[in-house]
């Protein structure tokens, strides 16, 4: 136990590990922007596997369906050759199956769990915390996903159903970003499940990593997330 606790502290830069609790707000990606919004709103209490990787809704569905077996399979992880990366320290590692199935040239942007034991352990710890949240008795889990990728409603329904297997307190908010609009607006999306809420976020700007290109879009998103979190907590 002492060795494991020491590992967790090392992975978190010496700080005691933050773990799932009675209420958890969890990012499902599809990249780090969603996790950053939850953090700035004071909702993100711990790091999960989708906080810092590139994914797609279909990939997230696959991870939930096989309980992350493929994501954690070391034989699936492959360092991206330098000549194929957008830059020396970005787009560092890919996943063989997800590369083909979901057209993802790289899943791990700044990390390389194919060659770094520390990066792999960090990934595995994120998965462990995610599993803990799903199985923690009485926990209320609010999952969030944001993507500009055109997503079929049935994929979002499948994700919501997979999460709901952990209990009736699981909720999914799916934010479909629709850039290129003249003004900021949030609109109701398809009605899928009582525990799944789809929101269309129309915005003039695009996500550029941890934020939108226009700060006004991030301010709008922050208010939207705060309102949704408040509604779900009632």
Image (cartoon, helix red, strand yellow):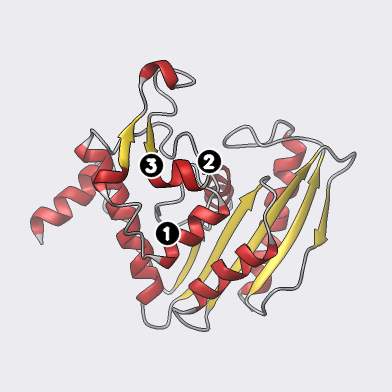
Residue that label 2 marks: 103
Residue that label 3 marks: 95
Residue name at image x 53 percent, y 58 percent: 43
Residue that label 1 marks: 63
Gap in Å between the C-alphas at discs 2 and 3?
10 Å
The answer, for residue 176, to whether it is visible in the render is: yes
Residue 224: image location, x then y, percent: 72, 56
The answer, for residue 21, to whether it is visible in the render is: no
Name the foreground residue: 34 vs 98: 98
Q: Could you tell whether 54 is left or right of 96 in the image?
A: right
Mark 2 and mark 1 lie on one chain; the one further toward the N terminus is 1
Q: Is residue 108 above or below residue 185?
A: above
Q: Which residue reaches farthest front?
A: 100
Residue name at image x 68 percent, y 45 percent: 148
Between disc 2 and disc 1, the foreground one is: 2
Q: Report crowding for label 2: few under 14, some 14 to 19, many 20 or more residues within 10 A (C-alpha).
A: few
Residue name at image x 23 percent, y 33 percent: 115
């Amino acid at each position: 136990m002492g060795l494991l606790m020491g590992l967790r502290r090392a992975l978190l830069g010496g700080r005691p590990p933050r773990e799932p609790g009675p209420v958890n707000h969890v990012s499902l990606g599809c990249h780090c922007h969603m996790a950053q919004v939850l953090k700035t709103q004071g909702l993100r209490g711990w790091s999960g596997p989708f906080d810092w990787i590139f994914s797609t809704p279909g990939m997230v569905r696959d991870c939930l369906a096989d309980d992350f077996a493929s994501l954690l399979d070391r034989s699936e992880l492959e360092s991206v050759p330098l000549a194929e990366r957008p830059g020396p320290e970005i787009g560092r590692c890919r996943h063989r199956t997800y590369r083909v199935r979901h057209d993802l040239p790289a899943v791990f942007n700044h990390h390389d769990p194919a060659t770094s034991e520390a990066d792999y352990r960090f990934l595995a710890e994120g998965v462990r915390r995610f599993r803990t949240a799903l199985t923690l008795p009485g926990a209320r889990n609010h999952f969030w996903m944001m993507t500009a990728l055109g997503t079929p409603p049935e994929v979002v329904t499948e994700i919501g159903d997979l999460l709901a297997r952990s209990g009736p307190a699981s909720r999914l908010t799916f934010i479909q970003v629709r850039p290129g609009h003249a003004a900021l607006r949030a609109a109701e999306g398809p009605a899928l499940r009582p525990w799944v809420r789809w929101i269309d976020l129309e915005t003039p700007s695009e996500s550029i990593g941890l934020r939108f290109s226009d700060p006004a879009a991030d301010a709008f998103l922050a208010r939207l997330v705060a309102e949704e979190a408040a509604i779900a907590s009632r």
